[in-house]
Image (spheres, rainbow, N blue to C red):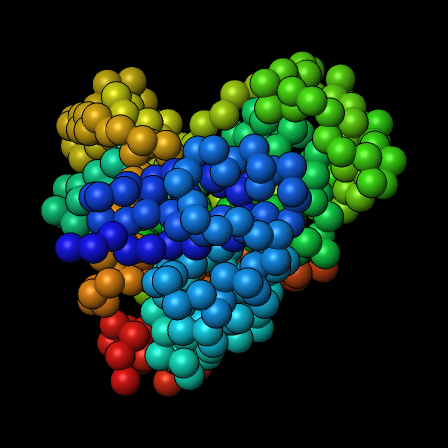
Amino acid sequence: MEDLRIGVIGLGLRVSIALAAHRPGRGSVVAALCDSDPAVLKRQAGRFEADFLTEDYRELLDRPDLDAIIVNTPDDTHERIAIDCLQAGKAVYLEKPMAITVEGCDNVLRAARDTGTRLYVGHNMRHMGVVRLMRDVIRKGVIGEPKTVWVRHFIAYGGDYYFKDWHADRTRTTGLLLQKAAHDLDVVHWLAGGYTTRVNALGDLMLYGDLPRREPGTPRPEGWLEEYDWPPTARKDLHHVIDVEDVSVMNMRLDNGVIAAYQQCHFSPDYVRNYTVIGTEGRLENFGDGPGDTVKVWNTGPSGHRDDCDIAYKVPAAQGSHGGADPQILAEFCRFAREGGATDTSPVAARMSVAAGYMATLSLRDNGTPYDVPPLDPDLAAYFDNGQTR
């Protein structure tokens, strides 16, 4: 079997996706690279065996030697670049989020349907061992029927990862309830077996709005990913535009009646997610998302609080970035790009997580007013539910 030949657009923080796709002689090879920053392009080129380098992604689209494109660019460019790639007939791996508006997501979905080109959206948490384990436990009925899901996201590096570059600018992301939370909202939907239909949210820019910022056009300081300031109030050299919230909470009602909640803080001392799922016959909980962590279940009672649990499930060992998810998701994409068929990720699910985060952001900026999530065009939903075949 010949290697799937892949072009990569964007070689920044998510270059791990491209590295996971580069498996010469084992099914896929990164054959072309694109980044608008010539210094980044030169620096990353040595990690691959790419035949072609360019600063203009459009030069990849007419190349007959490329079968697929990985889009790892900033969020506000996803819609335009993905549509261009789809119209050029290249299978697309689109890093989450699909777009920064609901309309943008629907535009990408329509382009995939109208061209018949395969679209895959990289919600890699569906391939994390801990998420798959939680879903398997729920499917077995160990906690009965899920009725509520709670997620708390503590983000120790928030000031560095999200407030020192374009992530802090709402024109580039809409907000972090969309950009950062899209993964978790997708997991909530996957575990609960439904999509959000109504949201309300509160939040604010509580800490990073008053800290020292860089002048426009000034690059991030060297070593910004190796040295972290503490406490958060000591951070400096932030992005010149900061108008997204650093604390947010949202409530969701799903189409199957499940009630869910998500909370996010970008100045916590630790980085960890906490998932809680309560069903008709028990409670599931996980702190952490790496190999060696534990999914705990309490399904006897009633009782007072118990630190121990009734059943403990060990998260399986994994290799590769993002808890072993990146190699798994790229293997699924390469198989899908080559053969088609069902996938654990879903462009419809990706759209619905963006839609939930987008509408929650509108609610947050409207003093918590509830908003309904716009439904997806049934014809579009049917196309993707049918495996992207007409």
Q: Quadrant of the C terminus?
A: bottom left
Residue lying at the far front of the rendered structure: 51
Looking at the rendered structure, the number of numbered marks drawn on it comes to 0
In the image: residue 223, left or right of residue 270: right
Rendering quarter of residue 233:
top right
What residue is rendered at 56% in x and 59% in y? 57
Q: Is residue 54 left or right of residue 29?
A: right
The residue drawn where x is 20% and y is 55% is 2
Task: Examine the rendering and report whether any part of residue 261 can be seen.
Answer: no
From what the image shows, is residue 148 above or below residue 209? Answer: below
Residue ID at (85%, 41%): 216
Instruction: Please state the horizontal and vertical placement of residue 364, each as a whole percent of the image.
Output: 66, 54
Foreground of the two, 47 or 134: 47
Q: Position of residue 351 (x, y in %)?
A: 45, 64
Quadrant, the N terminus: bottom left
Of residues 163 and 193, the one drawn nearer to the viewer in this rendering: 163
Residue found at the far left of this picture: 140
